[in-house]
Amino acid sequence: MPSIAIYSVKGGVGKTTFSVNLAWCSASISRRETLLWDLDASNGSGFLLGVDPKKKRSAQSVFDLDNDPRKLVQKTDYDNLHLLPADESIRTLDRQFHRIGKKKRLASIVTKLSKDYERVIFDCPPVLNEVSAQVMRAADLVIVPLPPSPLSTRAFEQVVEEVRGSGKKHPPILPVLSMVDMRRTLHKQAREANPKWPVVPLASAIEQCAVERRPVGAFAPRSPAARAFAQLWTAIERKLAKG
């Protein structure tokens, strides 16, 4: 069961939007049993899918050694797509990892979840700490959304350093140009400099995800944005198949 991390150390790059839309593509286009695991305390993935976290258990309790992670999983409105939502408790997760002293705790939970799911997608927080290190140890592929800007280039370099620091068998990285407007000179230059990178355009349909609280493919399936996410998911599946 491959796991895919959507990760950036920079906020505002479209990370959560990528996570939700790629998870939807996995469930709806590839028809795979898919778990979207929200590790960002803002619960952005849950919001975009119209799912509110249950109040009985906190998001961090999934990492307690005696708990079954499947008890926190919630259904979405889409076939094959489930959500492991976040809440404010996830902010203390870094301290919890240090307390339990398990460097591959997240990876071991993913192994348990593999009995129920064919794909796990992590919506990662924009941090460099034990949480991100645990994700890198668990991920088979890291997707990095990069709006065309010098700050994004710097953020990408930090991601590469973080991933490589996770061990000799670190996961491959797939950078993706996001929020691209080819009318802008800087964006054209970024595209010309990286012609093989996938591209997700700047599009009103993507912005409407937060209004609709649905993936773009669910309400605007013929839009350029929906096609871009579908093409990106196809590229991801191919990369995973190559190993």
Image (cartoon, helix red, strand yellow):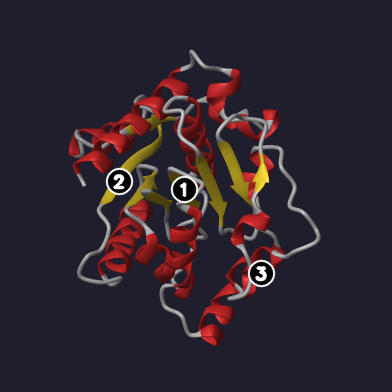
Q: In which quarter of the image is residue 67?
A: bottom right
* Callout 3–callout 2 Cβ contact below 8 Å: no
- In the image, residue 65 sits, relative to residue 157, either above or below, namely below
Q: What residue type is labelled 2?
A: Pro
> What's the residue type where badge 3 is placed?
Ser
Mark 1: few, some, or many residues within 10 Å (few <14, many ≥20)?
many
CA distance for labels 2 and 1: 16 Å
In the rendering, which numbered label is found on residue 175?
Answer: 2
What residue is at 35 percent from the left and 42 percent from the top? 148
Instruction: Tell me which label, 2 or 1, sits earlier in the chain.
Output: 1
Task: Tell me, for residue 121, which label it has, or none.
Answer: 1
Q: Residue 61 carries which label?
A: 3
**Above or below: residue 176 compared with residue 95:** above
Q: CA–CA distance between discs 3 and 2?
A: 32 Å
Specify whether 106 is left or right of 44: left
Would you place residue 151 above or below residue 30 in this image?
below
Disc nearer the start of the sequence (1/3) = 3
- Label 1 or label 3, whichever lies nearer to me, is 3
Residue projecting furthest to the right: 55
As helix, strand or loop, the secondary structure at mark 2 comes to strand
Q: For marks 1 and 3, give the CA distance.
A: 19 Å
**Camera-side residue of 108 and 183:** 108
The residue depicted at 61 percent of the width and 46 percent of the height is: 83
How many numbered discs, if any?
Answer: 3
Q: Along the line of sight, which residue is nearer the eye, 180 or 234?
A: 234
The amino acid marked with disc number 1 is: Ile
